[in-house]
């Protein structure tokens, strides 16, 4: 035994105390020198303890009882001998039945636990596959959403370009130059006022980006009062394109400016002016 590892069956029998004394001694000596076999026995002992705390043992079938009696060397004794030997053999027979039942239960429980582990592994694989599919679906959904948003943006831009072309071809459109208030600025732009479509376009290039908390805001003066035409920002390349509707009740404007206001826009003009609008057509008139 010292040079050989114990089997699973020997470990189970050792755990429930059903080994012969000589075999039990040999296993004990071997366990003192073999960590691997100690782990096998500990597993069997844990299983035996779990089985002991499970459902009560069932009565073994009659044929198993006959086999146990035969293995114990007991043959159908006469009535007197049966009565006399009952006390002496009852404990031994009970121990044999308990050992057989315990060993059988351990084998059954080991098989059940193995089956449960297999079921758990299959279930975990299915869960992992489902989670992986959900992640892929979520990624595809986000990608489709991004593509739809980009397509909508391009469609709006294309529509805006078409409307701007129509405005440029209209005789009722005023086009004004947009120049920076600071002399050292290189920004340039155009303001297109379309009276037919009731729309305004502001386009500029080389426009510095504003820091967080600030925005550009377009204003037109009509009848001595400034009206806001909305806020806008420049892209990383310094290009800005703003389109809006002419405010209700305004048919024309006298002057226009672009100021720097707080993020979200201001209800009244109060920030510094960065762009002035010069309507050359009005000067000619």
Image (cartoon, grey):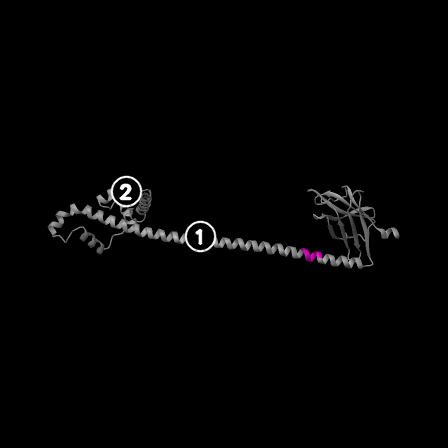
Could you say which is closer to the camera, residue 161 or residue 245? 161
Could you say which is closer to the camera, residue 137 or residue 187? 187
Residue 161 position, x and y percent, is: 74, 57
State the residue at coordinates (29%, 42%): 31
Residue 278 position, x and y percent, is: 83, 49
Side of 284 relative to 116 (left or right): right
Residue 236 position, x and y percent, is: 69, 47
Check disc 2 and report its element: helix, strand or loop.
helix
Residue 2 drawn in magenta? no
Residue pointed to by mark 1: 124
> What separation in Å lies between label 2 and label 1 (alpha carbons)?
38 Å
Q: Residue 34 carries which label?
A: none
Q: Are marks 2 and 1 in contact (CB under 8 Å)?
A: no
Could you say which is closer to the camera, residue 34 or residue 219? 34
Q: Residues within 10 Å of mark 1 (few under 14, many from 20)?
A: few
Q: How crowded is mark 2: few (under 14 residues within 10 Å), some or many (20 or more)?
A: some
**Quarter containing the N terminus:** top left
State the residue at coordinates (19%, 52%): 71
State the residue at coordinates (57%, 55%): 140
Residue ranking furthest to the right: 285
Magenta-colored segment: predominant secondary structure: helix
Residue ranking furthest to the top: 32
Side of 156 relative to 92 (left or right): right
Q: What stretch is highlighted in magenta?
A: 153-157
Residue pointed to by mark 2: 30
Which is more N-terminal, label 1 or label 2? 2
Residue 154 drawn in magenta? yes
Residue 230 position, x and y percent, is: 74, 49
């Amino acid at each position: 035994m010292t040079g050989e590892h114990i089997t699973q069956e020997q470990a189970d029998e050792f755990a429930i105390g059903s080994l012969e004394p000589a075999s039990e001694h040999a296993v004990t000596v071997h366990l003192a020198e073999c960590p691997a076999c100690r782990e096998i026995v500990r597993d069997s002992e844990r299983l035996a303890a779990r089985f002991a705390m499970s459902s009560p043992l069932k009565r073994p079938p009659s044929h198993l009882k006959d086999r146990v009696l035969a293995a114990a060397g007991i043959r159908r004794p006469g009535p007197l001998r049966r009565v006399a030997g009952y006390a002496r053999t009852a404990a031994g027979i009970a121990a044999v039945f308990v050992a057989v039942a315990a060993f059988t239960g351990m084998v059954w429980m080991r098989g059940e636990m193995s089956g449960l582990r297999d079921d758990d592994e299959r279930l975990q694989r299915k869960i992992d596959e489902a989670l992986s599919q959900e992640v892929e679906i979520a990624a595809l959904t986000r990608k489709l959403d991004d593509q739809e948003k980009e397509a909508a943006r391009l469609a709006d831009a294309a529509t805006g370009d078409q409307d701007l072309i129509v405005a440029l071809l209209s005789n009722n459109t005023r086009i004004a130059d947009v120049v920076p208030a600071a002399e050292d600025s290189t920004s340039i732009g155009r303001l297109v006022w379309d009276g037919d479509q009731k729309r305004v376009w502001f386009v500029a290039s080389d426009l510095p980006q504003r820091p967080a908390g600030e925005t550009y805001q377009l204003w037109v003066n009509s009848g001595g009062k400034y009206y806001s035409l909305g806020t806008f920002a420049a892209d990383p390349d310094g290009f800005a394109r703003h389109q809006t509707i002419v405010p209700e009740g305004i048919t024309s404007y006298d002057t226009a400016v672009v100021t720097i206001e707080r993020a979200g826009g201001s209800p009244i003009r109060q920030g510094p002016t960065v762009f002035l609008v010069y309507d050359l057509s009005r000067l000619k008139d």
